[in-house]
Image (cartoon, helix red, strand yellow):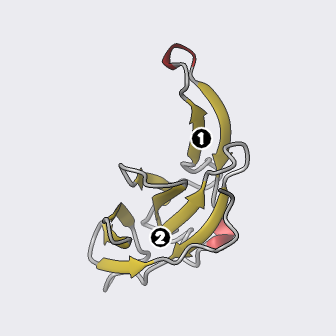
Amino acid sequence: MLRRGRPHGCLWVLDVTDLARIQPLAIFEVSELDSPWSRATPGRFGAHQFQEHMQDTLVYCSWFAGGLRIVDVADALAPQEVGYFIPEPGQGKAAPQTNDVDVDRRGLIYIVDRFAGFDILEFSPPSHRIP
């Protein structure tokens, strides 16, 4: 299936203060230019799965061929990428397909590739983060 010219999945930031009136605040997108494998076929590029529990203002996102994206939503109107990791494609594959992400209590990040691959990462957030 060709995906050229179609928008990719993105991260939406929503105000859920009033569940009866959920309001969109911002979106965060990753440019195809930010991954050497974004246009590899077959493959996908775009937001897929987010860490299911948050401990601070960082959102850890799997982005298929865009790898792992770490986005700070401290300013909900202007989410900012503060880190990323793009793994190499699995053997015989055109692109990485980072499918799932989780972060443990120690801050270790676990990402899984849809086809082959498992990475354990550690991230040191910038010291100038917005409180």
Depth check, front residue: 85 or 92: 85
Q: Secondary structure at mark 1?
A: strand
Q: Earlier in the sequence, mark 2 or mark 1?
A: 1
Numbered mark located on residue 84 in the image: none
Mark 2 neighbour class, 10 Å CA radius: few under 14, some 14 to 19, many 20 or more:
many
Question: In this view of the protein, can residue 93 be seen by the observer?
Answer: no
Q: Amino acid at mark 1?
A: Val
Residue hosting label 2? 67
Calculate the distance from the C-alpha at mark 2 to the C-alpha at mark 1.
20 Å
Relative vertical location of residue 122 with respect to residue 52 in this rendering, above or below: below
Depth check, mark 2 against mark 1: the one in front is: 1
Looking at the image, residue 19 sits to the left or right of residue 108; the answer is right
Q: Amino acid at mark 2?
A: Gly
Image quarter in which the C terminus is found = bottom right
Residue 94 coordinates in the image, percent (x, y): 42, 77
Above/below status of 15 relative to 121: above
Packing grade of label 1 (10 A; few <14, some 14-19, many >=20) is some
Q: Position of residue 58 (x, y in %)?
A: 53, 58
Q: Is residue 13 above or below residue 21?
A: below
Place residue 98 in its image quadrant: bottom left
> Which type of secondary structure does the marked residue at label 2 adopt?
loop
* Residues marked 2 and 1 touching at CB (< 8 Å): no
Foreground residue among 9 and 2: 9
Residue beneath the point at 28% across and 77% down: 118
> Farthest front residue?
131
Residue assigned mark 1: 13
**Which residue is rendered at x = 72% and y = 43% of the image?**
77
| Marker count (numbered) | 2
